[in-house]
Image: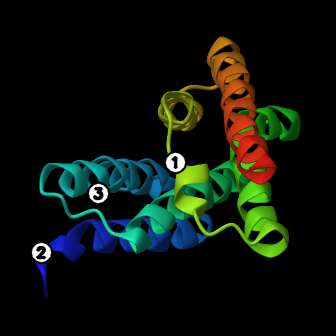
Amino acid sequence: MKAMWIPNILTGFRVLLAILFPFITSDFWLIILSMALITEFLDGALARKFNWVTASGQIMDPVADRLLALSVGLTLMFADRILVTSLLLVLTRDFVVTLGFVTTLLFFKQTDIIQIFRPNRWGKVTTFLQYLVFYDILLFSPPHQVLIWLTATLSVISAGSYSLNFYKSVRE
């Protein structure tokens, strides 16, 4: 195995954790979420540090992020740990990016999809805050509403940022 595939393997492991999360007993949710966070940090850090960036990794990583956020969020919603409206707001960026990604592939036939949906500052902060919200929900009852609203606000700002990039790309 080539070392440059380590980040992609970590990302694949995060996809597996996202798939398993709803089926794991709540006693292990914190552990699974922590393992996912570690892979989120390590895959990007290793790819950048050792120049192990691959086109497949640039697509897989945000897909794994969206899948994990959706899996954890829906699991917590069905466990009555977060309201539907709060979850929708916290995941606004994820829904917009997914819609834009699919729209770009199916209707606009853009070839530079990685550039269009390249991670930006707003997206990274939103991902960080989403993890904080999920940890907050798992550790505190009730969760801190100010954190949920802050995350929701940045999620909407991030969605707008990605939407603007998408708009610019289809106008060209």
Residue 33's spot in the image, x, y percent?
44, 51
Look at discs 1 and 2 and give the one toward the viewer.
1
User: Label 1: which residue?
Assistant: 118
Q: Which three-letter amino acid code belongs to the residue tagged 1?
A: Arg
Compared to residue 9, the image places residue 122 above or below, namely: above
Q: Which residue is mark 2?
A: 3
Cα separation between marks 1 and 2: 24 Å
In the displayed structure, does residue 108 sit left or right of residue 131? right
Viewer-nearest of discs 3 and 1: 1
Read off the residue under disc 3.
Answer: 43
> Callout 3: helix, strand or loop?
helix
Q: Nearer the viewer, residue 155 or 4?
A: 4
Question: In terms of sequence position, does the residue under pointer 1 or pointer 2 come before the other?
Answer: 2
Taking 83 as reference, is 67 above or below it? below
Q: Position of residue 90 (x, y in %)?
A: 71, 34
Residue 90 visible in the picture: yes
Residue 59 in the figure: left or right of residue 50: right
Does any portion of residue 79 appear in the rendered image?
A: no
Quarter-of-image position of residue 157: top right
Residue 85 point in image, percent of width and height = 87, 35
